[in-house]
Amino acid sequence: MFWYIFSHELRSRFRMLSTWMYMVIFFGIAFLVANVSGGAFDDIEMSAAKSGEFVFMNNPLNIAFAVNIILYFCTIVFAAIFGSSAVNDFENGSYEINFTKPVKPRTYYLGKLAGAYVSALSVAVATILGLAIGFQMPYLADFKVGPTMPLAYLHVLFYYTIPNLFVLGSVFFAAGLLSRKVINSYIFGIGFFFSYLLASALIQNVEKSLLAAILDPFGMNSLEEISRYWTSAQSNANYIPFSGVLLWNRLLWIGLAILVVIYTAYRFEFKTASSKKQKKQKASAPAPIIELDYFTKVRTQPYHSWKQFFPLCWQGFKDIVFNRTFLVLISFFSLFLVMFVAIGDNGVYGTKSYPLTSYVLMILEGSYLLFGLIISTFYAGDLLWREKSLNMDQLFDTTPHHSYVTYLSKLGAILLMQLSLLLTIMLVGIVYQLVIGDVRIELGLYVTELFIVQFLGLLPLTLMLFFLAIVMNNKYAGYLAIILFYVAVVSLPILNITHPLLTFFSGEAFYSEMNGYGVSLSRFFILKAYWVLFCLILTFIGFKFWDRGMDHSYRSKIKRIHKNGYDTGWKLATLSLAAFLLLGGFLYYNMNILNDYESPKSQIKLQENYEKDYKARLTALPQPSISEVHYSVDIHPSKRKMDLGGSYWLVNRNPEPIDTLVISYNAEYDIPKLSFSQTATLAHSYQDYGLRLYSLPQALAPQDSMRMEFSLQHAPKGIKSSGSGSDVMCNGTFVNNSVFPSFGYEEVWELSDNNQRKKKGLPPKPRMNAISDSSQYRNSYVNANSDYVRYSAEISTEEGQLAFAPGDLLTSWTKDGRYHASFGSTVPVLNFVAFVSGRYEKAAAKYQDKIIEIYYDKKHTFNIKSMLESATNSLKYYDDNFMPYPHKALRIVEVPYVYFAQSFPALIPFSENIGFTAKVDPESKTTVDYPYQVVAHEISHQWWAHTVIGANVQGCTLFSECFAEYSSLMVLKQKYGTERLRRQLNYVNDSYLTGRSNEYKEEQPLYLNENQGYLNYNKGTLVMNALQSYIGEEAVNKALGNFCRDYAYHSNPFPLSTDVLPYLENALPEQLKYLANDLFETITLYDNKIIATKRSYDDKTKEYTTTITFSTDKARYDGLGKKERIPVADLLDIALYDDKEEKRLAMDTINVSGGKQTLSLKSKEKPGKVILDPYFKMIDADRKNNIKTAG
Amino acid sequence: MELIIDSLKKTYPNGVQALKDVSITIGNGMFGLLGPNGAGKSTLMRTIATLQDADSGTITLGDIDVLKDKNEIRKILGYLPQDFGLDPKLNAIQMLNYFAILKGIHKASERKKLVESLLVQTNLWDSRKQKLGGFSGGMRQRFGIAQALLGNPKLLIVDEPTAGLDPSERVRFHNLLSEISQDVIIILSTHIVDDVSDLCTKMAIINNGELHYSGEPLTAIAAMHGKVWKKIIPKEELEAHTAKYCVLSSKLYVGQLALRIYSESDPDDGFVPTEPHLEDVYFYYIGTSTHHE
């Protein structure tokens, strides 16, 4: 009987057009994905598990990722397959026939489930085939597609697809079968969809990644967990290992699915009618005593559309909301919101921010667009065709109401439903804020962000939904049209259509704690108005297709529309069209005529041409160096404009004379003045590039100098196609060097992606100049053609704001409603400047005669005290160990939007997002006080960058970022002690390993780094920490101090990383000399692990003895991550800790020589954990197995 | 007020001529519309009820051009279609209240009282809080009647209203209709001839989209006086009789057939004269002679 049911189900599934359609569509999608990944289309990149210049898109990892992600996005299709299979017998009424046959419910259930499963699997197999065949296409780029590994496809089928479909299928089928409603399958589909998003949010955090990998029902996170540290070479060569976290994940979910199947098999029984009994009527109330003919006295009243609209709208809303389906959906939604908000902020080193209203909103509202879109689509169709599907339309259509009333009331009901979702978000957010505490609940911001910004964000789409649903004249055709519409909208960027007037979702409102919405809100409104008007045209046209009565054919609709002629509807549509065109014209004028519009493609073209047309010509022209600067910056925040001026002294440091000046400036700025102390004639001006060539009739002789004066103006010109149109913010302006003219060919404008360069016929470009390239030694890596300069600046802003420039404050005054300040420096500084203006509170401290000031937004008082403390301690530490601080003051100034802090001479603009709002609990042992550390890091740049700075070649950041990380780590250690650094080092270790795994090109040894964050920050931290662990903090500081003093203010040539290595090598004792090679000059990783531990207790000595068996391994890697093992001859720390890994109980340092070794440690207290290398002296390829519970 | 239907024509896209030039004038009171399935009754009723457009012809009610001023006619229209659904998740009060809003009863208190009075009138008071999904066919039909009576319509169109009602409910419904029929035009479409003879002062018979008779039932019956004859025959003789006479109906009667025929003069052959019924009129006009109950 099972086989009968099974084959019957299978046959009927394959008789359905939809099954074949799914197969064709999935095959097509996968084929397309393979083609896009394989580089079949110019300028389109496909996201992948791992990508990079040397990573194949068809390696096992990327294949598994592609198959999984396609099937993941089609979860809802599987909900449809299983759900419809579960309920089709109920829906078409044939269940009564089936149930009277001699078949057991269990057999019926299992047979149908198996049939649906096989048909679903065939869809999945079509996907895998599509991908496999897609990657065989001969026209694909050979650097993207490697050798075919057939086993990889089988692995993904057996490890992922087969189990996943079983998990999904068992749940979808059970949900549909037991409730006899297909909607419940869909609800679980949405549930699964979000559960992966949720698990993904977790995996970013190294401490929770294992949990995330196990909890994800699709197993995709375990894929990410497995390959977390894989290098390019490993990704290309490794098959997915079916073990560890993947195995556990699969076992867990298959187990759960089996339980679901068993439960369903027991629960499901044949019943012909709904088992739910009507509730017994309560003792009936007596009929009201009314005049029996009352009904003849109440007459239909003349049309009062509004009086009908509101009750109908409310009724429609109630129909949606007070319904079990919606309640389940909204509970799912709330549950996800709660989980997102609880885990959404992984923080920095696991330290989260205070749940400020804007942060909570940012986490929560992300799910609204997707969820609101899905639910609105579903209910828009449902509501529009409600009367018809209930066969109520004849009653409905003959009642005296204007059609637009019901139409609008349905639209209103959907909008109310959306508001209820937004209200849910608001409640979840507020409750979360109350639970965590310590923050102001900004109701106004909730209302603006949710009920205005988010609500309006979905409004055009909602109108579009109604239009499509009506015009398609059928509920399901409507859904199909909507899905196609989404696909079209999403694929616009692929077709290089990015203009805001052509992209349906254009208009974004950015909120900053400091600057509020700035002007982005008005830009948002105007773009939304544009799209709403567009949709209104459609709405009025669509409304013409909305008809009453029995005849719904297009023929009669068109006949009717024709007959009605140019009625109010057309008039309104015309009116909307006129308004739309007017506004569109206005926006076009603003974006394309007042401002320049550049699509990504034209931007690339511009970059390509710049290199092709000018590189050869411009690089041949010697340029002067800047030796003195004076800047004047007048900021007008309320007008968002800025007047700039200044002068340079230029020196010819070249051996040959200079006859042409190549001047680049920001092309969006007006440059009314550019004059020279000697005759110079404008030879060429390329406005597109902001490039001017001046020829000097009298060439500038070597060592000769000249003066240049300039003024620039910047003001927003209406509305730009992207961005706010101005570098000046209402509160918190932050501009840097890039606003001022510079000299020579700008290499940073060149295209950097080598694959892209190849397609454009450009030679490959190294990420950074080779360390042997001596032509670059005269440039520092922060700017070219500039020495350490004599510096002065004047800055002004509107009264009420304060303005800052680098250097020491000389004077400040207020005149004519403007605040002015002048700055200067007694020592030469890098020509690396920034200008800031905003409304600030001030906190100050002193270290010796140095003034330390923090300027912050009045809402962000949380960490000011600790940041001041850090600044004071940092100044002291660096003063003592490196060199005296050259300036009189040090200022940290808060700025909006950006996610970094940056050190300029005596001035540190510091983002509102990376410290000011961190929730640091100094008492908690698990908190990493990163605001404290970031302050220390940035201050150390006053030495490591501003005192010594590297030449513009590989390895340049070794003594800026690396040493800055080290310096700040030591300041942090001073406060918190060695043990407390371990948690942070664990994160850093993970960041280094994931960083090298995601390396796009090649990894270098640290001394040749190419400014990759994972090298100069993360590996830098690990390396320097190891160094100070081996030879002591003092020895390291001594070496760094010597280097710093020896190379202070060295320019032309600027120092190289190879200049500092001898200082470090000299600090190493003979037996540790190898460290220089291991840490700086090669990529050397250990793979140490604990194999077993055994704990025993001696009653006599009252001591615990823990025996540890462990192994050590060491390897060198090449740039792509190819591994070569080398002999181990190192010192390894092995320690016993308590359960919380906070208190060290015992430690021994032993010689290790690779392979298995055993060691016993004694402790008074009961040991909880055994840790290999607790202080991170060795960079370990997998830290997880360095820790094991003792016993 | 009179409902004047003039030269109404409707052909469906599939070529079926549902209405071929129909003209009727209907005044206040109950008007019976008789005809077999597919005769064009429903098309006619839907056209009057604004649910369909006619190809040509006019319908006017007083000053109202029904085919053009649809919203005007809807204000005074009550309509009970033959086949309709209701929202299974709402109860009777909620649903009727919903229709009351749509009918333009704007005052909430008035609406509440109206809904209650109609539920009492249609004997649904005790089930008022029951979900409509649990309603039996008869209850649903009564609900349909209640919603049609909302807003005191001047033109009430009811399509097979008593189908599914038990005899006592049917009587109750008939009483209700005749109570309100004094200054209301009620068009009752049915194929139960007795309903018409019990209730209607005027009637029309249509078949194949054509009007075959329009007038008072009593006049029609009187006109057939002396022209209806009956006879009991064995079943096997039916064919011979059908060929020979204008058979109105034949019903089983104790194993044999009771045959009724139309004849201007005495046909002899064992036929005896009999009193004409409205049913005879009906069968006479639709011109069919075989009818099995």
Image: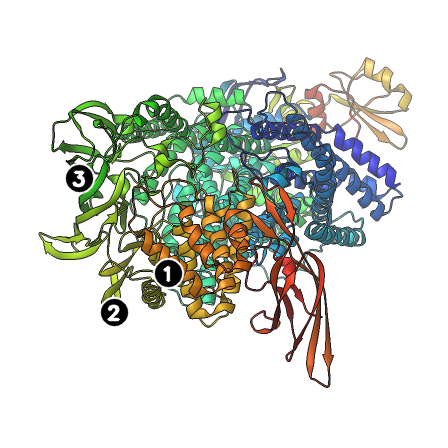
Q: List the residue tagged with mark 1.
A: A936
In the picture, the quarter occupied by the C terminus of chain B is top right
Residue at horizontal 51%, vertical 47%? A1081
Q: Three-letter amino acid code at disc 1?
A: Ala
Mark 3 Cα within 10 Å, few/some/many (few <14, many 20+)?
A: many
User: Relative to the observer, which residue lies in front, A425 or A222?
Assistant: A222
Q: Three-letter amino acid code at disc 2?
A: Gln
User: Relative to the observer, which residue lies in front, A642 or B230?
Assistant: A642
The kind of secondary structure element at disc 1 is helix
CA–CA distance between discs 2 and 3?
A: 35 Å
Quarter-wise, where is residue A1173 in the image?
bottom right
The kind of secondary structure element at disc 3 is strand
Applied colour scheme = rainbow
CA–CA distance between discs 3 and 1?
A: 34 Å
Q: Three-letter amino acid code at disc 3?
A: Trp
Decide which of tag 3 and tag 1 comes sooner along the chain.
3
Q: List the residue tagged with mark 3.
A: A649
